Amino acid sequence: MKHAEYLKYYNREDYLFDDVSKRFRRDKDLTAFDFFCIIIWKANRAKSTVAKSLLKIGREQGYKTLDAVVKALTGDIHKESEAKKRLEVLMGKWKLKLPMASAVLTVLYPEEFTIYDVRVCKELKNFESTKNQKPFDKLWESYEEYIKCVKSTVGENLSLRDKDRWLFGRSFAEQLEKDIENKFPRPSDKSKSEE
């Protein structure tokens, strides 16, 4: 790899939406490297857990490497023509939870999916229980409502991805303002002040 190529990994979101998303549309699957760039972007702390889980599921299906598992997983997604089925493949067959599955699908299908995120749920004042809905059809209905709410809450003429960013950004800014006002209390400080 040339040194200049490393620069593109600095801003992961640009890399994901400019390179990975286009490569998926062209190749109809992803490498483990590109897939785990999505996982790390969503939640770096989850990469080992996701890898172990996918390898276990993959071994049961005859795949021996993480690359083979990821190619199968992303190939399964590409074969589905409906958004609901794409999410069901990730959550059912491959056992990803809604926040992670929605992050993967947001990169691969940014016009159809948005990331299910607790900050955005708080901004919308709803949907905290969506990730726990059972059966899958009920979860899908709630997630569809979540997407509609993201679209309608941010009235500006923005893409779905930018509406998600706007809500996340507002949450971040408001939290930082509170932290500054409260002089960045530590969790132990908060419990003392509540006694």
Image: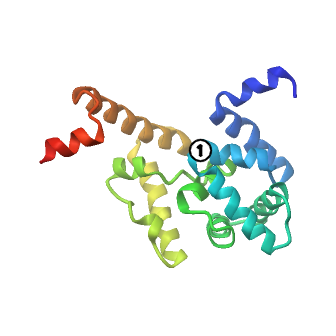
Whole-percent x, y for residue 151 in the image: 46, 49
Whole-percent x, y for residue 160 in the image: 54, 45
Whole-percent x, y for residue 91 in the image: 62, 68
Q: Based on the displayed image, in which of its 4 quarters is residue 58 positioned?
A: bottom right
Coloration mode: rainbow
Q: Residue at x 73, y 27 (%)?
A: 8
Q: Name the residue under label 1.
A: 44
Q: Along the horizontal axis of the image, is 16 left or right of 66?
A: left
Residue sitting at the far bottom: 135
Q: Along the horizontal axis of the image, is 6 left or right of 129?
A: right
Q: Residue at x 65, y 34 (%)?
A: 12
- For badge 1, the amino acid type reads Asn
Q: Residue at x 69, y 50 (%)?
A: 108
Whole-percent x, y for residue 182 in the image: 22, 30
Q: Is residue 47 above or below residue 181?
A: below
Would residue 96 be visible to someone looking at this image?
Answer: yes
Residue sitting at the far top: 4
